[in-house]
Image (cartoon, rainbow, N blue to C red):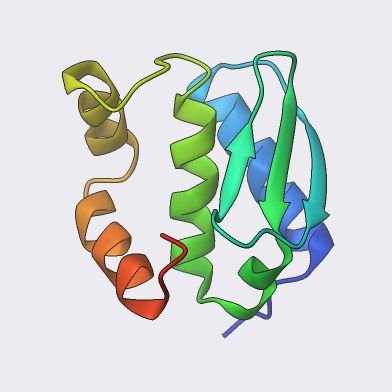
Amino acid sequence: MKRNTHETIKETVQTWVVRIGVEKPSVQFRSMRKKWASISTNGRLTLNKELLNLPYSLVEYVIVHELVHLLVPNHGKLYKAYMSSYIPDWQDRKKQLDALTKIG
């Protein structure tokens, strides 16, 4: 399995930016106690450094989750529809992520 690095995660962000059709955010990594990631409306994606230690499929889920928030600011029906179209098994990935820690 490919190891997550800052560079591979940034490449994944770029891939999904193109697929989703949103503006590329600046990407930063930092320690976050209560979240896996956050995205601001002014285009900053902050990722928890702990993502470097997770399976790639969960990292991808976190990235897509945040980028979809550039289209839909909440977790309503439209958000879920976008998530299902981009990552059909996103709910399973979310459960896996939630099971790993209390951060999710």
Q: Position of residue 54 (x, y in %)?
A: 55, 76
Height in image: 21 above or below 60? above
Q: Nearer the viewer, residue 104 or 82?
A: 104
What residue sits 65% from the left and 14% below the top?
A: 41
Q: Residue at x 75, y 63 (%)?
A: 31
Q: Quadrant of residue 86?
A: top left
Hey, which residue is sitting farthest bottom in the picture? 1
Q: Does 17 sit left or right of 29 as displayed? A: left
Q: Position of residue 74 (x, y in %)?
A: 35, 21
Locate residue 48, reporting x and y percent.
67, 59
How far from the left and from the top, in percent, is residue 13? Answer: 66, 42
Q: From this view, report whether residue 84 is shown above or below residue 76.
A: below
Residue at point 56%, 85% (across, down):
1
Q: Give the vertical position of 66 relative to 69 (above or below).
A: below
Location of residue 50 (image quadrant): bottom right
Task: Indicate the quadrant where residue 67 lies.
Answer: top right
Say above or below: 63 vs 16.
below
